[in-house]
Amino acid sequence: MKRLTALLIFLLVLPIAYSIGVSPAETKLNFKPNLETQLTYNLRSNMANAMDVELRLSGDLAEYATLSSDTIFIKPGESGQATVSLKLPEKIEKPGEHTIMFIATESTGTGGPEGARGEVLSPITIFVQYPGKYAEASLNAKDAKLGKDAEFIVTVRNLGTLKINGAKAVIDIYSGNEKVGSVTTDEKPVDLFGSATLNAKWNTKGQKQGNYRAVATVQYDEKTTTAEHRFMIGILNVKIINYTKEVYEKQVNEFKVGVQSEWNDPVENLFADVKVLDNSKELMTFSASEKRLNPWEIKNLAGYFNTANIQAGSYDISIALTFNEIGSDEKHYSYKNGTIDVLTGGEVAMTAKGGGMGRYLTTTNILILILILLVIINLIWFWKRKKNEEET
């Protein structure tokens, strides 16, 4: 019982168990032969008591770094400083990123829960250039509205030891495996340790709504590299993709209409008018609604179907959805027909959206409730044990 109580207490305080803070959180440096520099770290205590903090370094270049001290004492709510001195060699053979990790660890018994030791890490990333001309590229293909321009942004980073005189990209666009278009960006030089942004536009007129893939072949001087990114071409439409297929008779049933946006901007004022039919005779109508739908979002519109006067059986259903684009009062429509089964029996649905006890059953609240119950059980057990001792 005691161990279980301790475990629950630990779970409850876990989000605040970070007893040490450090800044900067990360340091990035470009390699230079024989570079010497000092990095200052500010460490702060997030606890109500003083603490000793152990400091150490790790990583493939840790041999080129030294600490001003192996430990530092920090008073409650205050901060202290530590220094890392770097002295890099004349040459590092392996190009790319290398890391020295600055690690601060709370000494045993000075901080949080029993057995817990707060620890923070702050990486020092040192980038070693590739010999000669070397570049990496990334592509951002923005979603587009059908009939409008799709915008492409290619970022070229110079990671070599020589300047790039000119970089440009040819971007091929694919729908599935079929190439449906191509466009060329502007051309720019890229300085050492620098980057350049290349831009292009492609008109989507004559294309179809759906998923596309853009592949950029970047030529920089005599070399090439590639990058790709997926994007979507949308139309102003919201599809009805699903709805509640079964409800129970003689009760209020929660009814959901699943919708999916096919548009690049938000739509709002979504209203689904639901009709229940028996051999084309309208038995009843009700609605489901939602205020807003984000670009490409899938969401359920919530409503309630009262079957108090409807017998068990299978019925036709007709759903008419209206919506409009943000900033416009023009109504747009989407429709879906189908069937719905009214079943015998079942439980009464929730009386209101978001109501009931479900909203209170969060993980934190459950843990708190269990902890309270365990404390009560412990107190009862202690009281009974004490009473038995007194009687004997």
Image: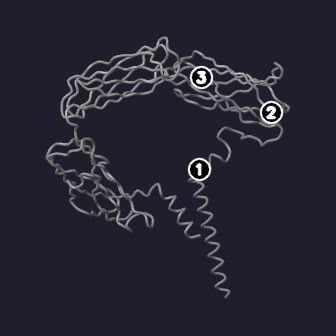
Q: What residue is at 75 percent from the left and 34 percent from the top? A: 246
Q: Quadrant of the C terminus?
A: bottom right
Dot placed on the residue nearer the N-terminal end, 2 or 3: 3
Closer-to-camera residue (318/378)? 318
Describe residue 307's horizontal placement relative to residue 158 as left or right: right
Describe residue 211's horizontal placement relative to residue 105 as left or right: right
Residue 131 place in picture, x, y as percent? 20, 36
Tell me the SS state at disc 2. Answer: strand
Describe residue 114's horizontal placement relative to residue 154 as left or right: right
Closer-to-camera residue (330/30)? 30
Disc number placed over residue 102 in the picture, else none? none
Looking at the rendered structure, the kind of residue marked 2 is Val
Disc number placed over residue 362 in the picture, else none? 1
Q: What residue is at 58 percent from the left and 20 percent from the top? A: 237
Dot placed on the residue nearer the N-terminal end, 1 or 3: 3
CA gap between label 1 and label 3 equals 33 Å
Proximity of marks 1 and 3: CB atoms separated by less than 8 Å: no
Instruction: Identify whether 31 is placed above or below 104.
Output: above
Q: Quadrant of the N terminus?
A: bottom right
Disc number placed over residue 238 in the picture, else none? 3
Tell me the SS state at disc 3. Answer: strand
Instruction: Identify whether 138 is placed above or below 8.
Output: above
Disc number placed over residue 342 in the picture, else none? 2
Dot placed on the residue nearer the N-terminal end, 1 or 2: 2
